[in-house]
Image (cartoon, rainbow, N blue to C red):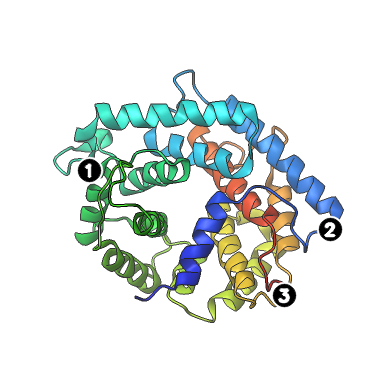
């Protein structure tokens, strides 16, 4: 296999970690980061609809709910919002299984990214996973029909599924059956992400794919990319900040962190936060602001997670 056990363990650690102090950040930045999380969580909750969804969109709702799970800890209001969202996603998938079918056309058809976000949420919440959801994602990967922009999210989700599937008892009633072919699909995705020069693949996501294949240069490249973004934050993509945080956190877990990275990344995130607590550009659509805010909160969760052993 091209990816390492270390990568799998770090992915799971980040999904279950609470928001706790990070060693590199000073007391002031830690406090600012926690306050930014609180404001961001509050804003994200205000955008949630009465039906539990964000914009009545399965993928967007799963993405926002996962951000709450990672950034809000056990806040009662966030727990309630996340639970409501999970029910919405489950009901929509149960009601609209046809939306996962390749025969379904147009806006009614769920994208690979939306399905991956839904699966990612179920895995994080320990909810039953619909077997057809995993099968459909794998079919898209096998057919080469995963858009470049969705590839790393789909890859990470399959890694998470494989990790949980490996630890599941044979009698478990948690949903989807064992899928040994997941490993091959992950390798295929990682290879495609690294080879793809399209701008649709964020540089941070490409570096995350390189890291997952054991490329020792990924950490240094991520630090250089972060330095570029810190020097000019005007065009920063918040999803890329998340992937850079993931790469640099994992480098710390392996003892290869080298240069401090949390402070510059935190500074960029705080700078990009809007006065209402959310993220996103002026004039962005509500959906775009939800996406950016969810990525920013997940990046903050990585930043504020306890420094792994070996990080300096």
Alpha carbon separation for disc pair 1 and 2: 47 Å
Q: Residue furthest top?
A: 50
Pointer 1 with pointer 2, Cβ within 8 A: no
Residue at left offset 49%, top offset 73%: 211
Q: Is residue 296 left or right of residue 144?
A: right
Label 2: few (<14), some or many (≥20) within 10 Å?
few
Alpha carbon separation for disc pair 1 and 3: 44 Å
Dot label at residue 259: 3
| Residue 226 visible in image | yes
Q: Secondary structure at mark 1?
A: helix
Q: Earlier in the sequence, mark 1 or mark 3?
A: 1
Q: Secondary structure at mark 3?
A: loop
The quadrant of the image that shows the N terminus is: bottom left
> Residue 286: image x %, image y %?
52, 32
In the image, is residue 4 above or below residue 234?
A: below
Residue at left offset 28%, top offset 40%: 130
Q: Which is nearer the eye, 213 or 206?
A: 213
Residue at left offset 46%, top offset 40%: 125
Dot label at residue 132: 1
Can you identify the residue that label 2 sits on? 26
């Amino acid at each position: 296999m091209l990816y390492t056990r270390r990568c799998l363990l770090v992915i799971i650690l980040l999904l279950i970690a609470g928001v706790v102090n990070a060693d590199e950040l000073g007391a002031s930045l830690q406090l600012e980061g926690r306050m930014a999380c609180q404001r961001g969580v509050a804003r994200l909750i205000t955008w949630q609809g009465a039906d539990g969804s964000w914009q009545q969109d399965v993928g967007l709702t799963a993405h926002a709910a996962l951000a709450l799970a990672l950034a809000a800890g056990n806040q009662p209001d966030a727990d309630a919002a996340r639970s409501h969202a999970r029910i919405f996603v489950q009901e929509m998938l149960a009601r609209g299984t046809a939306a996962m079918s390749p025969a379904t056309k147009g806006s009614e058809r769920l994208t690979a990214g939306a399905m991956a976000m839904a699966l990612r949420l179920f895995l994080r919440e320990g909810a039953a996973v619909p077997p057809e959801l995993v099968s459909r994602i794998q079919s898209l990967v096998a057919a080469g029909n995963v858009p470049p922009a969705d590839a790393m999210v789909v890859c990470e989700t399959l890694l998470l599924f494989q990790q949980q599937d490996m630890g599941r008892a044979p009698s478990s009633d948690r949903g989807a059956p064992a899928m040994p072919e997941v490993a091959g699909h992950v390798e295929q995705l990682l290879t495609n992400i690294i080879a793809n020069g399209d701008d649709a693949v964020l540089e941070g996501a490409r570096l995350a794919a390189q890291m997952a294949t054991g490329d020792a240069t990924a950490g240094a490249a991520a630090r250089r990319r972060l330095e570029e973004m810190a020097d000019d934050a005007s065009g920063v993509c918040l999803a890329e900040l998340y992937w850079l945080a993931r790469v640099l956190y994992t480098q710390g877990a392996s003892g290869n962190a080298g240069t401090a990275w949390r402070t510059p990344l935190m500074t960029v995130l705080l700078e990009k936060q809007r006065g209402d607590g959310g993220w996103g550009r002026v004039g962005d659509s509500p959906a775009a602001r939800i996406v950016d805010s969810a990525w920013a909160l997940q990046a903050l969760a990585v930043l504020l997670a306890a420094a792994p052993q070996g990080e300096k």
